[in-house]
Structure formats: C-alpha cells, structure tokens
C-alpha cells in the first residue's frame, strides 16, 4: 500500500467517505466470519452442537456448515473472510487518514472485491437453490460485500481506473448519481429471491 498524507481535493473527500464504509463494513464482516468459524469449530468438536445461528429450518447455519459448499477450497469458508476483511479495514483506515493509495493498489482492491462479489453470488445461489437453507452470519457477510464492491467500483470507475472512456460515460455518471437507488434495488432483489424461494415456510409463520 503506497500512502501519502495531505490531500484535500474532491477525490480525497470521496475516498474518505468510502474509507468509513470500508472500515465499518470490514469490521462487521470480520466479526461475522470469526464467529462463524468458532461455530464451525464447535460443530466439528461436537456433531450434536446446535449453532447459535440455527434459528429454524430455513435460518439454519448448521445445515449450511455441513455441506461441501461451506469448504470450497478445502477449508472453512470463514477463513477467507478472516483473511480478507482486515485488508478492507486497513484500506478504510488509511483513506480516513487522508492517504492517497497507488493505482495498483486500487486495481488489486477492485480485483479482490469483484472476486468477493462473485463468490457471494455463488453462495447465494447455492443457499437458495441447492442447500435450501440460509446462514444468518453468512448473510451478514453478503450484506457487507455488496456495498463494498459497489462503492469501490463506482470510485474506481469515476477516477478513471477502468479507463477514461468509462469514467466520462453517461452510464457511470448516472450510476454515481443514483448509487443508493441501484444498491437498494440489488438488496431488494436478493430479499425477493429469499422470500419467493422459501415462501412455503414463511407463510406458515403467520
């Protein structure tokens, strides 16, 4: 990470706002991943253990933890979050302090958050249509990764990291202007998919 303090241009102000999101979101994601790892370790120690996030047949971490999807790379998925979220937090802290990060660092961060979003998208699909259960702590991670990806991407697109043509395009200007609306639509889409897929259970709760 290359950091040079003292920068007062509009890009710095935008980066500092992004820094707050990255620091807070990274901390929340790290806590969720850490707690999930503890639950996983306890389940490995005691197969009869009921995780604290196993609330009902649908919101059930235990059902998710025992699947192959919970260990995509051969180890518990939360370890990925425990490794990645401190980087997000450190980036946020640096931005809040007024640091200017090198283009290569932003490019690396963009690659990381894009991979993170792709992985989360895959996990959402697996949870809804293959496993048939939702892990509440995992959903906290989903809720962190989506805005982190969105705002890092908007920042990089506007700053020209994705190319001058992209930075000056009407699409990018519109997306940056309507950033909250677009993010809200994405969150609502996930919620609608969850409600629709498990409606057979939700309707019994009334």
Image (cartoon, rainbow, N blue to C red):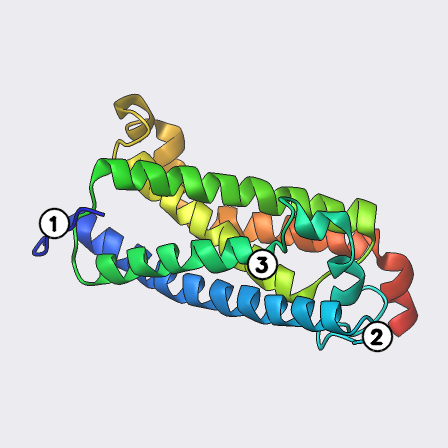
Give how far apart the Cα atoms at labels 1 and 3 are. 38 Å
Rendered location of residue 4, percent (x, y): 10, 51
Other residues around mark 2 within 10 Å, as few (<14) / some (14–19) / many (≥20): few
Query: In this rendering, would 113 be left or right of 123?
Result: left
Tag 3 residue:
78
Q: Are marks 3 and 2 in contact (CB under 8 Å)?
A: no
The residue to which callout 2 is attached is 48
Q: Residue at x 36, y 29 (%)?
A: 170
Count all numbered tags in the image, as a single digit: 3
- Give the x, y percent position of residue 10: 17, 49
Q: Residue at x 75, y 51 (%)?
A: 127
Q: How crowded is mark 3: few (under 14 residues within 10 Å), some or many (20 or more)?
A: many
Instruction: Find residue 33 and report its horizontal and vertical position in percent.
Output: 55, 64
Residue assigned mark 1: 9
Q: Can residue 62 be seen in this view?
A: yes
108 or 206, which is in the foreground? 108
Residue 103: % across, % down: 23, 36
Residue 183 versus residue 15: which sits nearer the camera?
Answer: 15
Query: How far apart, in angstroms, are the residues tagged by discs 3 and 2?
Result: 21 Å
Furthest toward the top, the residue is 165
């Amino acid at each position: 990470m290359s950091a040079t303090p003292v920068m007062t241009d509009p890009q710095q102000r935008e980066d500092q706002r992004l820094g707050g999101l990255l620091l807070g979101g990274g901390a929340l994601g790290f806590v969720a991943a850490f707690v999930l790892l503890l639950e996983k370790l306890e389940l490995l120690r005691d197969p009869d253990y009921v995780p604290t996030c196993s609330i009902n047949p649908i919101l059930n971490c235990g059902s998710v933890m025992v699947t192959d999807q919970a260990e995509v790379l051969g180890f518990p998925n939360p370890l990925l979050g425990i490794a990645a979220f401190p980087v997000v937090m450190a980036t946020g802290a640096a931005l809040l302090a007024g640091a200017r990060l090198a283009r290569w660092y932003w490019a690396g961060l963009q690659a990381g958050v894009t991979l993170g979003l792709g992985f989360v998208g895959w996990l959402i699909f697996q949870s809804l249509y293959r496993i048939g259960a939702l892990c509440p702590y995992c959903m906290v991670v989903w809720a962190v990764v989506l805005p982190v990806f969105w705002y890092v991407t908007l920042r990089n697109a506007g700053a020209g990291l994705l190319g001058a043509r992209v930075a000056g395009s009407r699409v990018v200007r519109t997306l940056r202007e309507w950033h909250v609306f677009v993010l809200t639509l994405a969150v609502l889409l996930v919620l609608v998919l969850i409600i629709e897929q498990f409606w057979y259970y939700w309707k019994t709760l009334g």
